[in-house]
């Protein structure tokens, strides 16, 4: 197995990412709106020093949100490429088909990290974090990005067409985000929500990011976070590769085309 | 397993649910041949190609490409074959160059090797000046040419072309055929082609017909058209029954489509001018010509002597 095909798939995604500069910039708008609108709005209901604290509390959550959206949307290019036929250029290549999934998930992780870096620079400029915190956030961000790409990979290999996009948004992205502790401390949630947060792998990414920011309460230990993130990511990627290599996944692609 | 066979299948079968797309296909195609699998849309031609190129698994039976068992090592098979899909597999948002560089990297070609090869192929297709152009700015024929170039970047031993001229206008179709013939001359690869424009397949060394998943053994296009008859007589008339009654004793039953009759004529001494005078104003048009592969197909599958539309 040579790395050239994998590099080609990753390179294609990267060149698309940097070519669509407007999209890259607009991807910064969402976290900013959350931070400024929700942060200030909800923050204004809090008392005195808690107000300041809520903005800081939101930083890991907003960073995690950026990683989640970027990695998930990038992983969904697996479906997009199928829809537009480009997938067949990769399927006919002399590589095992699971390499296509791996390459796409590497690309999704990198895409998420590019956006995370942009956001960190913005947060630095706004004075919400220090350089030291920015660096401390990097490694947790990488692990979270891999976890989000793995979630995206799982969704992508089971999606038949890109029409499901709204379904994916409503059933995966929003619940995963809201039920993660990104916006509020997990310990204060009602019990039934607490359970959902605990089984959501993304929660552990948010928590690991929280560990990097001083004075932000965390819910799990660093070791738990890392173990769950790595364990989930590896399992999800293996399952995604297995599912993608099954022929029935592509049968509609070729059956439809051969009519 | 004889290694001079480029493609061999034994009882190759594909079933989609209850539909039998390909039924016990037995094929032997020698290396270097230009083979045409002809038949209507939905006959199972594409499914056959997809089974031979590991894009879909056979339900039963087995196939060999250049002596390698297809189901044993799909990656090795994909290295050996090139496949040009029925509709474009290219990324429309990228340029010709980006598309071909990407495809070349997928075949693990080093950039300098890929560059040389892309230059070579684009000049065959007359697209060397358009290398940096976006795909959307090309005509349908040019895009198909880029698709074919993509399929042969890695110099495959066996090239599969699935309906290479479908959806193109006549000049583009002719151009694509010129490219295919030139490619074959220069690279000497085995070509497996499917088309439903049967009359186009005259460049093939051997053609077989495919209908509802069943193979009907053919031969060389020349043999087949010769064997069919000396000429084809086409008559359009408001009274098809009368004309049929008049001419059937001479030429046999025609294939009838509303007011159009098509007779297969085996004798080489028919005086058509005489016939034209005899029929006079009872026909609105009359035309005779050499048979082509379309006629062979029609007479194989819709021969009125053997009942309609098998």
Image: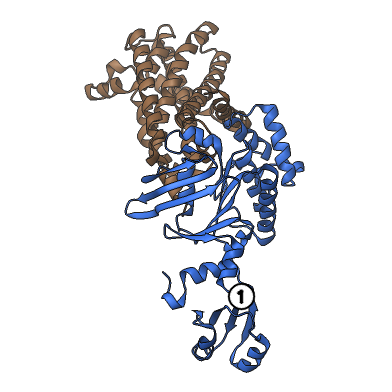
Measured as percent of width and height from the top left, residue B15 is found at 36, 50
Question: Residue at position x 51%, y 80% from top?
Answer: B254
* Quarter holding residue B305: bottom left
Which of the chains is blue? Answer: B
Chain A's colour is brown
Question: Residue at position x 60%, y 71% from top?
Answer: B291
Q: Is residue B53 above or below residue A120?
A: below
Secondary element under disc 1, as helix, strand or loop, is loop
Q: Residues within 10 Å of mark 1 (few under 14, many from 20)?
A: some
* Quarter holding residue A15: top right
Where does the C terminus of chain B fall, quadrant-wise?
bottom left
Q: On the picture, is B253 further left or further right than B200?
A: left
Residue A214 or residue A147, whichever sits in front: A147
- Residue B137 in sight here: no
Measured as percent of width and height from the top left, residue B188 is found at 65, 44
Q: Pointer 1: what residue? A: B230
Q: Residue furthest right?
A: B129
Q: Is residue B55 above or below residue A115?
A: below
Protein chain holding label 1: B
Q: On the picture, is B227 further left or further right than A232?
A: right
């Amino acid at each position: 197995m040579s790395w050239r095909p994998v590099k080609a798939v990753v390179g294609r995604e990267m060149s698309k990412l940097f070519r669509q500069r407007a999209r890259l910039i607009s991807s910064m708008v969402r976290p900013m709106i959350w931070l400024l609108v929700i942060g200030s709005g909800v923050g204004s209901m809090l008392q005195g020093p808690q107000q300041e604290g809520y903005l800081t509390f939101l930083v890991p959550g907003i960073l995690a949100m950026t990683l989640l959206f970027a990695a998930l949307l990038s992983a969904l290019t697996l479906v997009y490429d199928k829809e537009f036929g480009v997938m067949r250029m990769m399927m006919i290549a002399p590589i095992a088909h699971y390499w296509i999934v791996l390459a796409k998930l590497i690309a999704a992780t990198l895409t998420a990290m590019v956006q995370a870096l942009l956001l960190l620079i913005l947060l630095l400029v706004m004075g919400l974090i220090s350089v030291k915190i920015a660096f401390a956030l990097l490694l947790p961000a990488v692990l979270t990005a891999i976890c989000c790409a793995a979630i995206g990979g799982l969704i992508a290999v089971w999606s038949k067409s890109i029409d499901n996009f709204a379904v994916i948004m409503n059933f995966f992205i929003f619940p995963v985000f809201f039920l993660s502790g990104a916006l509020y401390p997990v310990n204060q949630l009602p019990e039934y929500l607490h359970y959902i947060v605990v089984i959501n792998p993304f929660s552990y990414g948010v928590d690991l990011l929280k560990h990097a920011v001083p004075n932000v309460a965390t819910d799990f230990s660093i070791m738990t976070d890392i173990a769950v993130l790595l364990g989930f990511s590896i399992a999800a990627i293996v399952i995604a590769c297995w599912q993608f290599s099954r022929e029935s996944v592509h049968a509609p692609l070729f059956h439809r085309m051969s009519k | 397993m004889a290694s001079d066979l480029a493609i061999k299948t034994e009882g190759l079968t594909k079933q989609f649910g209850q539909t039998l797309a390909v039924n016990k296909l037995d094929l032997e195609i020698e290396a270097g041949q230009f083979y045409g699998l002809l038949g209507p849309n939905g006959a199972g031609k594409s499914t056959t190609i997809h089974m031979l190129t590991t894009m879909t698994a056979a339900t039963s039976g087995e196939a060999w490409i250049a002596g390698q068992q297809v189901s044993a090592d799909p990656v090795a098979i994909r290295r050996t074959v090139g496949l040009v899909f029925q509709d474009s597999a290219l990324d429309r948002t990228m340029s010709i160059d980006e598309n071909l560089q990407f495809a070349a990297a997928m075949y693990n070609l080093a950039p300098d090797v890929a560059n040389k090869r892309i230059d070579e192929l684009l000049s065959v297709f007359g697209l060397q000046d358009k290398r940096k152009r976006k795909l959307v700015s090309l005509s349908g024929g040019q895009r198909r040419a880029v698709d074919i170039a993509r399929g042969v970047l890695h110099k495959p031993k066996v090239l599969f072309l699935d309906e290479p001229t479908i959806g193109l206008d006549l000049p583009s179709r002719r151009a694509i055929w010129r490219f295919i013939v030139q490619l074959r001359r220069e690279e000497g690869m085995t070509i497996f082609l499917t088309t439903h424009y049967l009359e186009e397949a005259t460049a093939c060394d051997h053609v077989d017909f495919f209908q509802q998943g069943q193979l009907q053994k053919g031969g060389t296009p020349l043999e087949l058209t010769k064997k069919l008859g000396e000429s084809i007589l086409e008559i359009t008339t408001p009274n098809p029954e009368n004309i049929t009654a008049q001419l059937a004793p001479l030429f046999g039953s025609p294939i009838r489509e509303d007011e159009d009759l098509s007779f297969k004529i085996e004798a080489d001494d028919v005086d058509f001018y005489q016939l034209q005078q005899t029929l006079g104003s009872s026909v609105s048009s009359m035309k005779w010509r050499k048979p082509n592969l379309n006629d062979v197909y029609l007479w194989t599958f819709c021969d009125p002597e053997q009942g309609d539309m098998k």
